[in-house]
Amino acid sequence: MDGTNPVIASGVQNRPSLELISRLRLKAKHVRRNVLLMAKNKGDGYVGQGLGAADILTAMYFYELHLDPACLASPERDRFLLSTGHYSIVLFAALAELGVIPRDELSSYGADGSRLEMSACETTPGVEITGGSLGHGLSQAVGMALGSRLSRRNFRVFNFLSDGELQEGATWEAAMAAANFKLDNLIALVDMNNMQADGKVSEVMKVEPVAEKWKAFGWHVQAVDGNSMEELVHALHTARLVLDHPKVVVCTTLMGKGVRFLETRPKAHFVRVEAHEWDLALSELEKSAP
Amino acid sequence: MGPGIERIGEIGTMSSTEAERGFTKAMSFSDAVDEAETVEKPFGQALVEVAQSRADIVGLTADLAKYTDIDVFARNFPDRFFQLGMAEQNLVGVAAGLARVGFTPFATTYCVFATRRAYDFIAIDLAVGRANVKVIAGLPGLTTGYGATHQGIDDLALMRTVPNLVVVDPCDATEINQAVHAIAAYQGPVYMRILRGRVKRVFDPQGYTFELGKANLLRSGKDVALISTGLMTERALQAADLLQTGGIEVAVLHVPTLKPLDEEAIVHLARETRTVLTLENHSIVGGLGSAVAEAICMAGLTVTISKVGIRDHFVECGSVPHLNEKYGLSVPHIVRGAKDVLSRRS
């Protein structure tokens, strides 16, 4: 890598405590359970993405974000921007665990009139932006990060985006601006599940080499297993220490993670689950390692 | 005329030096003519006025600070100004982010780039959640000879369809100043066209009041109503004088806010004259003419209507006066249009 880039962390140093990691893993299991219950009730949903990204969302809401669930409108809060609106299932699942959304309400996911929409909209409590039209999140994150600095409130801004979303040119307009403004209060998380609407990202329009692209745009880059709580926590911790650069954590994830028969099912953007499989999925999840 | 300020020529009469030369002006800074009373960079000046007492006002541009007059703000408030480079989607997204954390961003580019390139960002990032962003757009309609890439002939139509968005097309330096103050006070997303550089003063600042969402009846007359927006209102007033000498009583209703539209004022006037000519520095598809026709039709009135504006096509490069003449936006066209619509009155 070229010398102007910050040091790229490798391996796991300052190992987070086992107690912390096991607590977060258990929380991730609860988030996954919520995802399955929501989709079971509706009959379908973005289960593959929801299960795959559950560890990232858990690490965010139960480790990294400075966010008081009782005071969601606080101007000092860290912001978590979900670019990929269709991942709303896992965002709501996490927000329910956090107490922002009543657990009972999860069963209304995707129902007519429900505020838990299939594509997350900012009108729902805890949802910062209207995602779904991809490539919008990072620009708004840049604006918020500039605002954080200008107002001296010093909150941080996190943008969750997907590998397919990197095909949207606006993402790179924002990436260029973030480095130009030296936004070290901005952290991007890229969910690399190699799946988009028309098929595998690597076949539709390859986005690799992803880490090198971000580096070339002036970002501090870490690549982790996005289903390893230990690696996620460590990367987030490392990101806090890097100054003068925006940071990205490239997270490789497995769609359907936590339910073996979904992990190995031939992948699709919208994973089909048969009616009789929901209870099977829930019981597989319960049996899986915490 | 200072260095770098180029002469555009008097629109509509083809009598200026530039029109006689008949060449496209490159990278012009100014939308005014020599002879008239003008104001230097009225948008930039007004923004500085507002920002002096409002720490929440921030400015952004996409490589067009000098050409949209926000350079005045940038010099006065360098810490509150953000240059985004040539990236209009990012311009709007960043402005949305700043608004979401409590700032009131004014983001500038040209009409074409704001509305064609960044439409989805205006719709989703700004309009869905009513983000308090003001998109300020230069080069409306045929104020540039730079051809289809730079002439904003469809922006009003595009912006008018976006829910929650306020759309403003001011006439002159006086109105630009007042409109900047008004939209800064308004909480919500706004798309506003501007004239830039040395801008003509048409309205007396002492006697004119811009109110967001309100039309202004500038002149009464029983025969025909000229309903116009933006810089076309100056030409409407000139055409009204000419028609008056021919014995035709002309009303002029200036509609600087296209959305929300002052339907009450429009319908009230149309009911009186029963003859309407709409004027816009824009395509006749989807802009003021369409909005006025809709309002009148929905009110159940039978009115003879005609539109002055750019027909449904793109415009080539050329000198501004030549293009305004060729594409029917000049005063003689308005006079002919008014006579024509009167002759068709049922």
Image: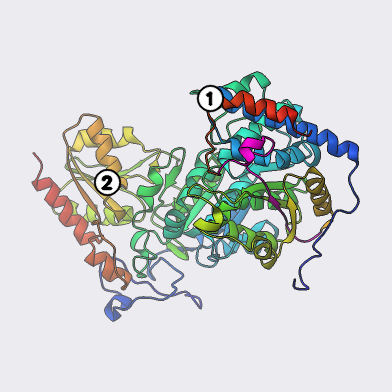
> Camera-side residue: B200 or A226?
A226
The N terminus of chain A is located in which quarter?
bottom right
> Camera-side residue: A141 or B79?
A141
Residue at x 73%, y 40% (from the top left corner):
A55
Residue at x 17%, y 53% (from the top left corner):
B337
Report which residue position mark 2 lands on.
B289
Q: Amino acid at mark 1?
A: Ala
Instruction: Name the image quarter holding residue A258.
Output: top right
Marks counted in the figure total 2
Report which residue position mark 1 lands on.
A275
Establish if A266 lies above or below B299. Answer: below
As drawn, is B2 to the left or to the right of B82? Answer: left
Residue B244 on the magenta span: no
Residue A60 % position (x, y): 75, 41
Instruction: Name the image quarter holding residue B195.
Output: bottom left
Q: Secondary structure at mark 1?
A: loop
Q: Chain of mark 2?
A: B
Q: Chain of mark 1?
A: A
Q: Residues within 10 Å of mark 2 (few under 14, many from 20)?
A: many
As drawn, is A222 to the left or to the right of B23? Answer: right
The magenta stretch spans which residues? A243-266
